[in-house]
Image (cartoon, rainbow, N blue to C red):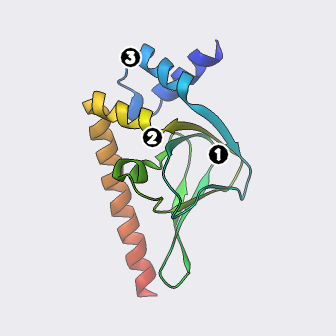
Amino acid sequence: MQPLERDAETLRNIPLFASLPTARLKLIAYTAEVVQFEPGEVIVQQGDSADAVYIITEGETGVSVRDDEGHDIELGTMGRHTLFGEIGVLANSRRTTTVKAKSRVTTFKISAKLFLDLVRQSPEIGIQVMTVLAERLERTTARLQQHERR
């Protein structure tokens, strides 16, 4: 299997992209940048500009947020087939969390422009993104409430 076809199949295994035609998956795979990170390396930093979204194809990351007092609050982990970075891209704002590699991590980095084009052109992707955001908001809220009780 050629690298482009392999990357398209990897994307097909991600629920967000599962319903897209093969030609569209190949276009995303062709335009996405494969980026690798070593354990402990910061992938995105809270407060930085949001120029892309990432999809983890291998490895595990930790997610944290820094509160107003400068304390880092661990929000959880993300693994294979997880999309992140979409909040800043969709809101045209800064990164809301810091994501750091816990192991060696491989990602597809998709530019903000391409991601926004996908959301505009594929209603099913827009709905999937909203679902991911709602689930993430629910988990983050619960984690922050636990942190406040301490």
Please state which of the two labelled residues, at mark 1 or mark 2, is closer to the viewer: 2
Q: Where is residue 133 in the image (x, y as percent from the top left)?
A: 34, 52
Q: In this view, does 116 lie above or below 41?
A: above
Say what amino acid the circle numbered 2 marks.
Ala
Q: Is residue 41 left or right of residue 7?
A: right
Q: Residue 21 carries which label?
A: 3
Disc 1 from disc 3: Cα separation: 27 Å
Disc 1 from disc 2: Cα separation: 23 Å
Is residue 83 among the parts visible in the rendering? yes
Q: Is residue 86 above or below residue 99?
A: above
Q: Is residue 102 above or below residue 118?
A: below
Q: Mark 2 points at which residue?
A: 112
Q: Mark 1 points at which residue?
A: 59
Q: Is residue 149 left or right of residue 39?
A: left
Say what amino acid the circle numbered 3 marks.
Pro
Furthest residue to the bottom? Answer: 150
Nearest the eye: 34 or 2: 34
Is residue 15 among the parts visible in the rendering? no
Q: Quadrant of the N terminus?
A: top right
Q: Which residue is drawn at 25% across and 32% down?
A: 123
Please state which of the two labelled residues, at mark 1 or mark 3, is closer to the viewer: 3
Disc 2 from disc 3: Cα separation: 21 Å
Label 2 element class: helix
Q: Residue at x 43, y 36 (%)?
A: 113
* Comes first in the chain, label 2 or label 3: 3
Say what amino acid the circle numbered 1 marks.
Gly
Q: Where is residue 116 in the image (x, y as percent from the top left)?
A: 37, 37
Label 3 element class: loop
Q: In this view, does 69 lie to the left or right of 148?
A: right
Nearest the eye: 44 or 144: 44
Q: Which residue is drawn at 39% across and 27% down?
A: 18
Q: Which residue is drawn at 35% across and 24% down?
A: 19
